[in-house]
Every structure is written in structure tokens, then in C-alpha cells.
Image (cartoon, rainbow, N blue to C red):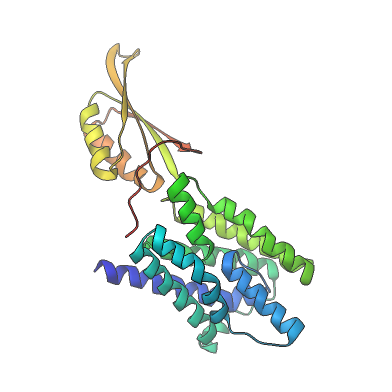
Amino acid sequence: MNTARRLALIAAGSSIMAFNINTFVRAGNLFPGGFTGLTRLIQECASRYAGINIPFSPILFLLNAVPAVISFRFIGKRFSLYSCVAIVLTGLLTDFMPPLFVEIIQLHDTLLSAVFGGILNAVGISLCLHAEATSGGTDFIAIYIAEKYSRDAFSYILAGNCVILVVAACLFPLEQALYSVIFQYTTTMGLGVLYKAYKQMTLFVVTSRSDEVYDLIREKTNHGATSFAGKGHYEKSDRIMLYSVVSANEVNVLVSGIKKIDPAAFVNVIKTEQLGGRFYRRPKD
């Protein structure tokens, strides 16, 4: 069932990304981020300057070959295989998607193409990420950075995409590159909302039932906690404050569980910008 779930999410995400490339991206002549954008740039250059129409999938597969091998060695074998499935499906669907589906959307407003294309791109990528896979390319790099350095790497990938946009601005009308910035920014912001596994949050929990709260944190997240003895001055009673850093997608479950254990617990959740030291991440399969 887990394999079927992952494959279904990957198929849905790949279909959305392929549909997006053939509609919003092509309608606005945009250059998405990562290797998808680089593939589009190579296609446009070959078509405009050499008169050659190169299919989307061969370029995408070639660009992803080295990152896929690195991911297979250093991130996880099954994770990398599922990611390769997503890459292959996206490439083939982009080249062979029936015209009926492509002609559904005929936009002539580039700004609308950039905004809604970016949102749709974020949805497709997040579905692959929820399947414990990736859409490939720079996502391999982003996940590797997040795994090794506990940093949210998507903003850095956005900065790296500026190189592609500078080249596009030099070879094509400047408007295409500027609208592509909007597309990439929308994608990054959308991913920040739809997928939070690589963000960390700090929990401060003031409670009189610290052992039970810690057991909950340990059971649900496999993270540790540090306790500090204190005194509640309002009620003049002893309290324990637990400090723990968890993944952002684990916060809601923990807060709900803490309130069931101790309805009087005081919980403060803070966004963690940077983290040093040991932080447990479930290994990729």
C-alpha cells in the first residue's frame, strides 16, 4: 500500500508538472527553476539559433544523470529510484501529452502564466516530496544540503537559478527573464507552505508533567529534549520547561498531544532559522 501511495503521488505530481510546462510555461515563454528551466533554455536556443526542435525528455534525462547517481550513493537508493520515476514520467508526459489537455488553457497574459504556473509547479513538486521522492535536478542538491547542514535550501536554489535567468535575459527578451523570476519566486513560496519537512521549529513547553510530555516527543518524532527547572510566579508553583527542536510538519501533532496530557501546559513555538549540532532526520530509504 505504501508503494502504491508513493507511485500515485509521483504520477499525479509528474502529470501536473508536465501539464504546467505545456500550458503556463510555454504560454508565457518562461524559464522555470532548476534543470527544467535549463532544459527549456537549451530547447529555445536550439530552436531559435539553430532551427532544431529538440524533445524535452532527452535533455532532462541527461542533465539529471549525475545528480541521480550522487543521490543514489549519498541520500537513499529507493528514494533515488522513485525520484527517477518522477523525472522519467515528467519528461515523457511533457513530450507526449495529448493536445486536448494542452489546449485547455490558452493564456495571453504573461503575468498570469507566471503566477499560476508557479503555484501549479509548487503543487507538483510538493506531491513528489510527500511521496518521499523528488522531481530531480536541483531538488537533489537542496535535499542533500538540508540533510547534511539542517538548512532550508530552497532559497539558495532560487538564488542559483539567477544564473539561468541572466543567460536567458542576454539571449531572449528581458521580459521573459523577469516574468520567470516571478514564476520561480511563486514556486518557492508555494513549496514553503505545502511542504515543511525540511524546516525546524523550536518548542518551549512549560508543564508539570514533563516526563509524559517528553515521552510523547520521543515517541512521535524520535527527537530529544532538555529540561529546565523553574517556578511559576503567578501560581507560586514549581514547573519544568522542556526545550526541543522538531520538524515543522510534526508541530501540530505534538501540540495537540501535549494539550491532552496537560491541558494547563504553556507551549511556545518559534521558527528555527539556523541549527547546529545533532538533529535527527529519518534516513531516506
Q: Is 63 located above or below residue 144 in the figure?
A: below
Q: Is residue 152 left or right of residue 133?
A: right
Q: Looking at the rendering, which quadrant does residue 7 occupy?
A: bottom left
Quadrant containing the C terminus in the rendered view: bottom left
Q: Tell me if residue 271 comes above or below residue 13 in the rendering.
A: above
Residue 38 position within the rendered picture, expressed as x and y whole percent measured from the top left: 63, 70
Q: Count up the numbered dots.
A: 0
The x and y percentages for residue 72 are: 40, 64
Estimate the x, y position of residue 174 in percent, counting from the top left.
Answer: 78, 66
Rendered residue at 27%/13% (across/down)? 237
Q: In the image, is 165 to the left or to the right of 86?
A: right
**Which residue is depicted at the point 58% across and 70% down?**
36
> Is residue 61 shown to the viewer in this render?
yes
Would you identify the image quadrant in which residue 95 lies?
A: bottom right
Instruction: Note whether residue 135 is visible.
Output: no
Say whether residue 88 is left or right of residue 113: left
Left or right: 249 in relation to 17: left
- Residue at image coords 46%, 54%: 144
Q: Position of residue 62 (x, y in %)?
A: 54, 75
The image quarter containing residue 128 is bottom left
Tell me: residue 232, above or below residue 108.
above
- Quadrant of the drawing holding the N terminus: bottom left
